[in-house]
Amino acid sequence: MDGLPEHDVPDEVETDDWALAVRGSVGQPRTFDAADLADLPMETFSEDFDCEAGWVAEGLSWRGVRVGDLLDHVEPSPESRFALVHAMDGDYACAFPLDRLESAVLALELDGEPLPTVHGGPARLIPTGDGDCWESVKWVAAIELAADRPEDTAREIALGRVE
Ligand SMILES: Nc1nc2c(c(=O)[nH]1)N[C@H]1C(S)=C(S)[C@@H](COP(=O)(O)O)O[C@H]1N2
Ligand SMILES: [Mo]
């Protein structure tokens, strides 16, 4: 397979006037719109992506903002150890230890083009290193920091689609 397979875009996904909310156990909760993100340093890297369902997309080139650089602007509270990354498609959300999330990239471009909605645009989380396919959260709407590991849904929703 060459690129990522195209899955349906759920009706709840609304990309007009998109802004990312960062909230929870932070001193300065705020939103970042596309212009705010464009002011932050961007990183580019290539990676294969493989899904639990058995397919692989090779050599994808992602470009975006390191989540740790974003969080530098919201004053995470000292007790923050986890974060829940919320998507626009219903309850889809994935929990991460904060140190792992900090090294992830919020991708805004794929293969040199603005990230298409069908692949999670305007912004998709790309955790670096080994991870599960459901952790690559498409249509990221909010990042919510917390002291304790939050309940999440991503694994159950994704595995529910794999027979
Ligand atoms: N918001 C959201 N992100 C998601 C999912 C989803 O259902 N909703 N599915 C995950 C799974 S299981 C996979 S394999 C990839 C699929 O990415 P693609 O649609 O770009 O091929 O998205 C991941 N991110
Ligand atoms: Mo998947």
Image (cartoon, helix red, strand yellow):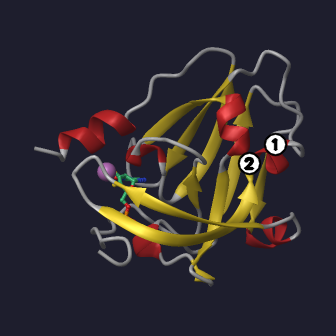
Q: Which amino acid, mark 2?
A: Val
Q: Quadrant of ligand 1?
A: bottom left
Query: What is the secondary structure assignment of the residue under circle 1?
Result: helix
Residue at the image position 32 percent from the left and 52 percent from the top: 51
Task: Count neighbours of disc 2 (C-alpha within 10 A) and say few if under 14, some if 14 to 19, many if 20 or more.
Answer: many
What residue sits 81% from the left and 42% below the top? 71
The residue under label 2 is 67
- Asked if the residue at label 2 sits under 8 Å from ligand 1, the reply is no
Image coordinates for residue 18, horizontal then vertical, percent: 62, 67
Tell me whether circle 1 and circle 2 mark residues in contact (CB < 8 Å).
Answer: yes
What label sits on residue 7 in the rendered view? none
- Residue 55 in sight in this render: yes
Give the left or right position of residue 50, taking residue 87 as reference.
Answer: left
Disc 1 beta carbon < 8 A from ligand 1? no
Quadrant containing the N terminus in the rendered view: bottom left
Q: Can residue 18 be seen?
A: no
Pointer 1 residue: 71
In terms of depth relative to the viewer, which is nearer, 162 or 130?
130
Circle 1 residues within 10 Å: few <14, some 14–19, many ≥20: some
Could you say which is closer to the camera, residue 48 or residue 22?
48
- Who is closer to the viewer here, 83 or 107? 107
Residue placed at 27% from the left, 69% from the top? 8
- Residue 156 image-quadrant placement: top left
State left or right for residue 119 relative to residue 45.
left
- Image spot of residue 2 (x, y percent): 35, 78
